Image (cartoon, helix red, strand yellow):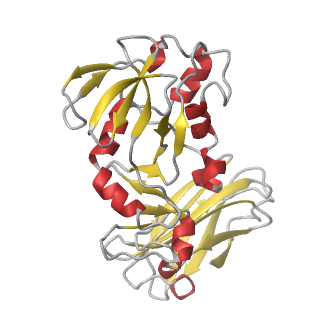
Amino acid sequence: MERVVALLSGGSGSSGGTDGPITQTVTFNKNDIGLPDDGTLTLVITGDGVDVDKTGTADADGNVTFEIPGILTGTEITVTLTVKSSDGTILYKGTNTQTLVGSEFIVDVKLKGQFFGSKMPGEALAVGDIVFNDGSAEPYSASLTLSDEQSAAAVAVIYDASGKGVGLKQGTDKCWAAFGKAGYSKIDALFARDMSGSDVSDTVFAGVGATDGSGSLAALKAAVSDYSAANYSAWAFVEDYATTAGLMGEYASGWYMPSITELCKLTQARVTVNSALDKISGASRMSGTYWSSSQGYDEVYQAWTVRFLSNRPIEGSKDSSYSVRVIRAF
């Protein structure tokens, strides 16, 4: 980790000495930040009344200079510095939030070789990529070997080209809703109906809860008055996933139980996903039957599941004991 200190200067006064913004400059030297001769530097600063997004290249003296509106001392700002090569490859990217003191702000950055994965934060992700807690990723290959540090830093495996990934841990023997509880009834916001097909590759679902499970836990809680870990153990696993997986920071949130459509998509990628999971020490490979967040339509006491071995979606009684996996967008 390398710390870059930048000083604001220029205008008719200091950054905190005026009632309104003044034009200031900030300069980075390409040698100090490892910027290639033909590379680009992007500086983004956001905060209360602050919206800066500048990209520049080095001049003949090796300096990249940005003109930005003045920022008042005491303003909380988030600063992101991104260095790219001429082909757009991210060499490093650092982001941190701080309160501006005087005219100085700080950016913590990593050099490319200091990331856990060979793909930098912000690069496109592919099915099988292993995502690490520093935002980098490593593509799966049969010859891939992860260090203990990489395994400890892994947070997910990408299963969808859109950037969705599945968590490394799973809950087992969990019920969707215990028998006789409020969730053992129709919940309109989680409804999904099977329209056609017989397996995960050709089944089409319709209904408000069919395609996106990201709001499903909130919808369940809004519909029942007896929510607890004992009554809804599959959902409680989802809610407590960050603690179970030891996640902090950005990746401690955003996890949810997949809808039936998302679970079918995950099942289609199961061979690659399991191969990648096998590379991560402590990760659980996927097998058995998994809950989705989508309620079935034949009877109010059923919810959709997918059986990995038979490669097909099937409705299961909500009080049955199945596994649960969480997903997240990356």
Displayed quadrant of residue 253: top right
- Horizontal and vertical percent for residue 40? 42, 73
Q: Is residue 330 visible?
A: no
- Horizontal and vertical percent for residue 104? 73, 70
**On screen, 326 above or below 26?**
above
**On screen, 149 above or below 282?**
below
Rendered residue at 61%/15% (across/down): 181
Rendered residue at 60%/45% (across/down): 241
Q: How many discs mark residues in the rendered view? A: 0
Which quarter of the figure is the N terminus placed in?
A: bottom right
Q: Is residue 52 visible?
A: yes
Rendered residue at 36%/75% (across/down): 144
Rendered residue at 34%/62% (across/down): 275
Displayed quadrant of residue 81: bottom right
Q: Is residue 194 left or right of residue 60?
A: left
Residue situated in front as seen by the camera: 72 or 257: 257
Q: Is residue 22 left or right of residue 132?
A: right
- Horizontal and vertical percent for residue 170? 51, 47
Q: Is residue 244 left or right of residue 115?
A: right
- Horizontal and vertical percent for residue 155? 52, 58
Residue situated in front as seen by the camera: 303 or 246: 303
Residue situated in front as seen by the camera: 304 or 12: 304
**On screen, 247 above or below 205?**
below
